[in-house]
Image (tube, rainbow, N blue to C red):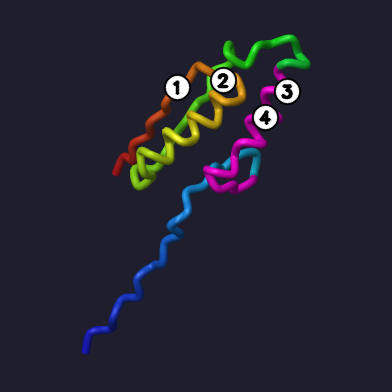
Amino acid sequence: KKKKKKKKKTDPEAYIFYNGEQIPVLKFGPKFEQEARIYKQKNQDPKDVPVILRADALVKTGLVQDLIKLAQENGFTKFAFKATQKIQ
């Protein structure tokens, strides 16, 4: 008899990994707010600060768009996407 492989349960929630924290994407607004405040205190306009995004292939495009919207609501306007590829 073949043993049934247990399927790994995946978490349907998408997270941001930020400074050692795991934060659901749609709850990241306060962090953008905090970052914008810090940049303003340093006399830097958030619109001049690039937000670098790297998303797993399984993350829905809509969630990435939601994250960008949260950033824009806090004054960030420059975005860069970083891609990684596993080499076997």
Residue type at tag 1 = Ala
Viewer-nearest residue: 27 or 48: 27
Among all residues in the image, which is located at the extreme front? Answer: 73
Q: Circle 2 sits in a helix, a strand or a loop, which is it?
A: loop
Q: Looking at the rendered structure, which numbered label has been put on residue 37?
A: 3
User: Is 2 or 55 nearer to us in this picture?
Assistant: 55
Residue under numbered circle 2: 76
The secondary element bearing badge 1 is classed as strand
Residue position for label 1 = 80
Q: Secondary structure at mark 4?
A: helix
Which residue lies most toward the left here?
A: 1
Which of discs 4 and 1 lies nearer the camera? The answer is 4
Task: From the viewer's perspective, tell me whether residue 3 is left or right of residue 83.
Answer: left
Q: Amino acid at mark 4?
A: Glu
Taking the spot 41% from the left edge, 67% from the top edge, the residue there is: 9
Tell me the distance, in whole angstroms, between the alpha carbons under discs 4 and 1: 19 Å
**Mark 4 = which residue?**
33
Residue that appears at 52% across and 17% down: 77
Residue projecting furthest to the right: 41
Q: Choose the circle earlier in sequence order: 4 or 2.
A: 4
The crowd level at tag 2 (other Cα within 10 Å; few <14, some 14-19, many 20+) is many
The answer to whether marks 2 and 3 mark residues whose Cβ atoms lie closer than 8 Å is: no
Query: Magenta residues, as a range?
Result: 21-39
Count of numbered tags: 4
| Nearest to N terminus: mark 4 or mark 1 | 4
Name the residue rendered at 66%, 35% in the picture: 31
Instruction: State yes or no: residue 25 in magenta.
Output: yes
